[in-house]
Image (cartoon, rainbow, N blue to C red):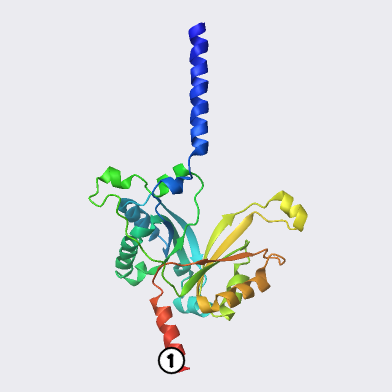
Amino acid sequence: MFRRKKSILLNELSKNLKKNKDEHLPPFEKREKVHSLLLLVTIVSRNQGAYFTDTFSKHGASLSISMFAHSMPPADIISLLGNESTTKKDLVLTIVRKNEVKEYLDIIKKRFSISKASKGIAFTLPVSSVSGIVVYKYLSDYNKEERTMSKEENKEEIIQNKENDFELIMAIVNKGLTDLVMEAARKKGARGGTISVARGTGNSELAKYYGVVIQPEKEIVYIVVRKDIKDDVMKAIYDEAGLDSKGQGIIISLPISDTVGLEKEVENTSVTDNKE
């Protein structure tokens, strides 16, 4: 009986000591080496996504998922193509280390160069935070160097933030109202967008306070635009499908770090500027 009580007391003491020790530890990012993460977004024709998820996973990506989406080119282009199936897309989301992103972009460029059917666009977005140390370690493959016994252990390539000419606009609207978003965006110079179906929930307390009821059935429109027209495009979308409209739209923009497949738009912009 005495031994059992002694064991219980020792266990409790051990737990309390560990708890006090953890409470006094500095934050994880202050005591450990942290790898910056990027979200690599790849948009390709339907059935092309499986190649990228498989290839990225083999290359070492800890998370790469593909989902169905569809693009919204102008009506005259759809009629010219004569086949609406060409608007079906795969949207691939992959978490990669910032110092390794060039390797993944090279994979994408090589695949895009094979044929017209394999072409698409890709860009990266900075991941600002992750919920939990275990999640971070998994997404960043924290022990990769130790596991692979790399000769370059503890060496990390430093990549400076570089300016990019594009930003990503995400418009989350009620289902069936994406036409409003794309029509407004095109009027301000956007060329096209990609759409995915989603479900959402609203905070009931905030709904009471602001008098807004959020419908669960949503569609997300992803539009890559040049920085110089981003504000005009966002305002146009909000005017047509903002939170106080039937679209109940929430519109945000995210900085893009790297791009693949948007070179022609840059060239076309330069040609237009020179003509003027």
At x 42% / y 80%, what residue is drawn?
266
Q: Residue 13 location, x and y as percent?
A: 51, 22
At x 73% / y 50%, what residue is drawn?
205
At x 46% / y 60%, what residue is drawn?
126
Q: Is residue 69 left or right of residue 149?
A: right
Q: Residue 261 location, x and y as percent?
A: 39, 72
Using the image as rendered, state which of residue 5 and residue 180 is in the foreground. 5
The amino acid at mark 1 is Asn
Using the image as rendered, state which of residue 245 and residue 275 is in the foreground. 275
Q: Residue 225 location, x and y as percent?
A: 50, 74
At x 32% / y 46%, what residue is drawn?
144
Could you classify mark 1 by the number of other residues whose Cα lies within 10 Å: few (under 14), some (14-19), or many (20 or more)? few
Give the farthest residue toward the left. 151
In the image, residue 229 above or below residue 12: below
Q: Is residue 64 left or right of residue 171?
A: left
Observer able to see residue 191: no
Q: Residue 38 location, x and y as percent?
A: 43, 58
Using the image as rendered, state which of residue 15 and residue 74 is in the foreground. 15
Which residue in the structure is indicated by mark 1? 274
Q: How many marks?
A: 1
Using the image as rendered, state which of residue 71 and residue 236 is in the foreground. 236
